[in-house]
Image (tube, rainbow, N blue to C red):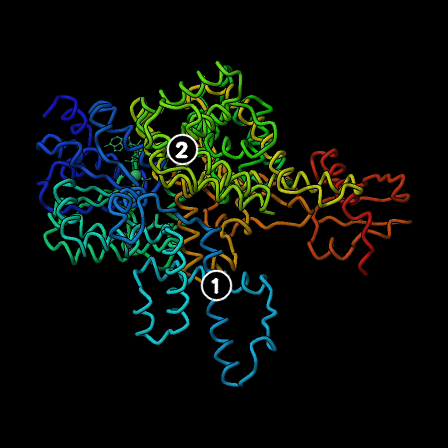
Amino acid sequence: MPKEYSEYLQKLNDRQQEAACGDISTPLMILAGPGSGKTSTMVGRVLKLLSEGISASNILAMTFTTAAASEMRDRIAAVAGKPIAKDLTISTFHSFSLQLCRSHAEKLGRTPEFLIYGHGQQRRAIIEAVRLLEEEKMSEQNHAASKSAEDSNDTRSLEYFKDKSKRWQKFVAQAKASGKKPADLRKIGDVTGAAILQNYNDTLKSCNALDYHDLISCSVELLTEFPEVFKECQDTWKAIVIDEFQDTSAMQYSLLRLLASHDCITIVGDDDQSIFSFNGADISGFASFRRHFPKFREIRLNKNYRSTRYIVEAASCLIRHNMKRCQYKEALTDNSCGSKITIKECQNEQAQCSFVVDKILETGSERSPDKLSYGNIAILYRRQVSGKVFQSSFRERKIPFNVHGVAFYRKKVVKAIISMLRTALPGCDDGPYRVVFKALLPFEKEEKKRVIEHIEKISTCRKCSFLSAAMDIFSAKISGTFKRSKLTQGRKVLSTLELISNLVKREQSISAVITSVANMVPQKYLLEQRAVVNADGGRLLNEDNDVRSVLQYLLDDVSDVLSMQVAENDSRRDSPEEEKGCVNLLKAFIDYITEREKENFCSRRQDNQNSVTLTTIHQSKGLEWDIVFIVKANESEIPLLHEFNGITEGDGASIEEERRLFYVAMTRARKKLYILYVAMDSNWQMLQPSRFLKEIPDHLREVQVKFAGFLTFFITSTACCFDFQTLIKNRLKCAVILVDGNFETISFQYCRFEVEDRSVVSHLFHQWAKKRAFQTPKR
Ligand code: ATP
Ligand code: MG
């Protein structure tokens, strides 16, 4: 065994060593709480596999987020070196399955370029499926009543179908995650469900598409129904290790079981950290594993190496409130107590952001006794949108940050999407076309380079644009340069560009345009990018399934831009709505992106290690930082009670899942944990702190509350527009404010403030008054 490997293994404790170095042909299950060294032990297991002569290219390591995959690769690279780490396949389930499906697409009735349907497209396909079903039903009824179809023309609006489709989308996702086919549903008497699923599947097939759930079930299908695929996988994947096993769905588990029929499998997990049930995650996987791999060995780790004692204790107190826990795990640590958990109320999101910024600057300052680099700090939130306010403040205050562990606009795939969009705008210069050709031409890197250089040469010689040079070349106006196959590929790129341009002209919704364009980025390009990045740092920036989060992020940005546009429209009431077509919105969006790109250019030289991480809690799993801020720990966020999510008050299981999510967030912190919540939203509605805060015992926390006591508003004189009821209803805690005058010359004086900062109240008041000024009073 190489010296570095044995040195690494010696640093593990006895139980960890026992797990890592045990016989590799015995299935192994490691069960333990957060920070107990599960991933560290798994790295040890990979080293053991390598030292037993299994080649890196025959080892498959699976995990659930791209960030966790890249973390694992970094850890292995640190011991075994980058070349070995590069040869390992460290993948998420989706990205692994995607590759398998693309390689055998024709067996699935698709071409290798099949599309992956994201949430929006799925929704549209489901609307279609529901509509088809309703039409069938209607025509049957009409037939029965022998009415003419025209008489009873269906007048139901798109809204009606949209509404219905929400429920069905969840149904389809669940059916797929559990591997149900239309026939299975029919067997249990669910005729409607079966019909919807069948219609939906048919639509996807006719569009040469698969959705994310299909990727897993199609992989299972390939392995069960095609012995040659099974053999290929057996020959390739001689050892399998899975981190975060608690998040596997039944379908994913079936895939694992097939892949690991040689028994050389290690699973690592913690049922208390299962947070992906919306994706079908199912902790009964542990029981299935015990059943299907009867020779398995189970090892439990119980010492937390990551966090201070206060954090470990607080997190265990929280998770004890969950009734449905598979196995009780004692959390112990030899670490010192550390400082108490700070729980803080902030007036609003802006105040919350200022608090965080101040703390970060304080910690990062040279004067701070334990100065930390920004890379040791993370901000965790439940929903992506809560991170936005931090991004703008960090920019202003020059704090380097990365979102999802990478600077978003540095991703080549994002650049490709943006460039494709840019080409649809009038006056587009050569730059975006160059990027688009690079992304869309399906040639090897060197060959692609030669083609692009040739286009550039022609464009310089003829003093014409890159696009017209490309058009001349590929329409064979300039003869003899390329073979026919290359001309065909070039023409394909040109027709994609035309498609995008038509889409922008035709489509009303900019989000729909972006979604379609994102799906046009070829898989080959995404894989290529992944290889490039791996070579110089082992990061999986552009892993395939990342397109989904890229898209989500872009769509978030779009909604920001849209709201800015709406605000603008409000202030210029004369601007006609029609003028704000898709092209104009796209322009505004591109301007916004250009700003972000510039900024990214500045941060390009900065080391990722030295930037604050902004991430959702889901994406933070498996990772750790010295200082963690959990922000917006409000009832409305965590638990996220939302009908759309299927999480409702009465639903105990969902609350338990939300608690696990909070538990994951808390256990990311090594030394200091801040939990912040806001007192009111931007509309002056009071917000409640998360119920989970009460579950952290008093002796482990220090609480900072800014608003104290009850607030009463006295409204005098002409201030009749105030919606007094709203204030009362929301139990507005604040101060006593006497309002005097009317709305033209509004002035108010405060009598008794229990709020520290008078300007905050004044600011809030003005904001509120502005909003209310044109409304008639509700009395
Ligand atoms: P999670 O459940 O959050 O994924 P985990 O169980 O995978 O956590 P690791 O990330 O492997 O835990 O380890 C947590 C921290 O503890 C890491 O910083 C790791 O270096 C450290 N650690 C693990 N084992 C030991 C050990 N035997 N001695 C010292 N430090 C250790
Ligand atoms: Mg881990």
Quarter of the image for residue 531 reads top left
> Residue at left 48%, top 56%?
123
Quarter of the image for residue 180 reads bottom left
| Left or right of residue 619: residue 12 | left
Does the rendering let one see residue 699?
yes
Along the line of sight, the residue nearer the viewer: 384 or 553: 553
Location of the N terminus by quadrant is top left
Give the residue type that dot 1 points to: Arg
Circle 1 is placed at which residue position? 167
Circle nearer the N terminus (2, 1) = 1
Q: Secondary structure at mark 1?
A: helix
Q: Examine the rendered structure and indicate whether residue 777 appears above or below residue 131.
A: above
Give the residue type that dot 2 points to: Leu
Location of the C terminus by quadrant is bottom right
> Residue at left 30%, top 60%?
179
Dot 1 alpha-carbon crowd within 10 angstroms: few under 14, some 14 to 19, many 20 or more: some
Circle 2 is placed at which residue position? 440
| Left or right of residue 202: residue 57 | left
> Residue at left 60%, top 27%?
427
Along the line of sight, the residue nearer the viewer: 659 or 617: 617
Q: Point out residue 445 in the picture as x, y percentages from the top left corner.
A: 32, 24
> Residue at left 17%, top 53%?
226
Does the rendering let one see residue 331?
no
Q: Nearer the viewer, mark 2 or mark 1?
A: 2
